[in-house]
Amino acid sequence: MTPRELADEVSSLFSLPDLVVRACAVMDSPTAMAEDLVEVIELDANLVATVLRLANSALYAGRGRIDTLSRAVLLIGHNAVRDLVLATAAVDTFRGIPKEFVDMNVFWENSTACAVIARLIAGRGRMREGESLFLSGLLHGIGRLVFYVRRPDDYRMVLELSRTLEMSLAEAETQVFGFAYPELGAALLEDWGLPERLHLPVRYQLSPFQAPAYQRETAIVNLATEMTCDIAPCLKSACESEPYVPDPKTIPCIQLLGLTPAALTEISLDAMAASLDIQEILHPVTRVTY
């Protein structure tokens, strides 16, 4: 079995809604105007509300109150709206996964934090199309959901191996399946028609310097996942995030991205506020208590 074969099983079960496909087609058209995108989004009241909430979230703070869809699209930009449309569809797609494997609230909380951190890092580097890193960060772990849905019995073996041999889940996945969640997640994103700049950072997130292209983007996803582990406990309590202390294995990525310790701490603090906002937008059932 290959990542592609397993992803194909899921893509037939969890296909993107027609509205999402239409919205993405409009946004990928070189001749599309903002008005064209507005016309598609207006067909779904929930999506309209989601876009407006994002435009008024902490992630876009300081732009004034945005109360019309056209202004929201202009503020956020086509790429960010596309990513939001895809993100909400992905969140809605994977529901009802047994808690034996994962608490889906926690999964999306951590995924959202990773997405926000990835976008903030990309913003620091003034990267072209850095907005797309939000989606790569959000979906970096989606391969695990595919394992849970399609191979639950085999994944119990993964969990047992990880516990008994004290190996990482990715190592145990490779031993059981022959590949780990990054390859599987990237294969699903390819099936969904997402471009290389989105699925390559997912595929090579554990080994960014092996990526054949988009190494900086892949390094961002690698670093964002590590930083998420650092701030995750603070997202669930009233504790304040302390200055970020990098894990030694992320140092090469930090050096590649030219980030200082002060910048990393600032990104970590900014991500705390923005993540709470975005969690409520993408996954409204999540409740974070302060």
Image (cartoon, grey):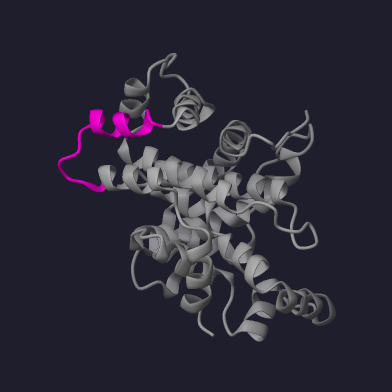
Place of residue 13 in the rendered image (x, y in percent of width and height, measured from the top left): 53, 62
Q: Compared to 270, does 125 lie above or below?
A: below
- Count of residue discs: 0
The residue under the point 43% across, 53% down is: 258
Instruction: Specify the quadrant that holds the C terminus.
Output: top right
The image shows residue 246 at horizontal and vertical percentages of 62, 55
Q: Is residue 213 left or right of residue 162?
A: left
Residue 239 drawn above or below residue 83? above
Question: Residue drawn at (39%, 48%), measured in percent from left and top?
Answer: 132
Given the current orientation, which residue lies at the most extreme right position?
164
Res 248 quadrant in image? bottom right
Q: Residue at horizontal 67%, vertical 84%?
A: 176
Residue placed most toward the observer, 108 or 275? 108
Q: Position of residue 42 (x, y in %)?
A: 37, 28
Residue drawn at the location 46% of the way across and 32% of the way down: 47
Q: Where is the N terminus found, in terms of image quarters?
A: bottom right
Frontmost residue, 107 versus 89? 89
Looking at the rendering, the stretch of residues picked out in magenta corresponds to: 28-43
Q: Where residue 254 appears, x then y in whole percent?
A: 50, 57
Along the viewing direction, whichever of 170 and 231 lies nearer the viewer: 170
Give left or right: position of 242 versus 274: right
User: Is any atom of residue 207 visible in this view?
Assistant: no
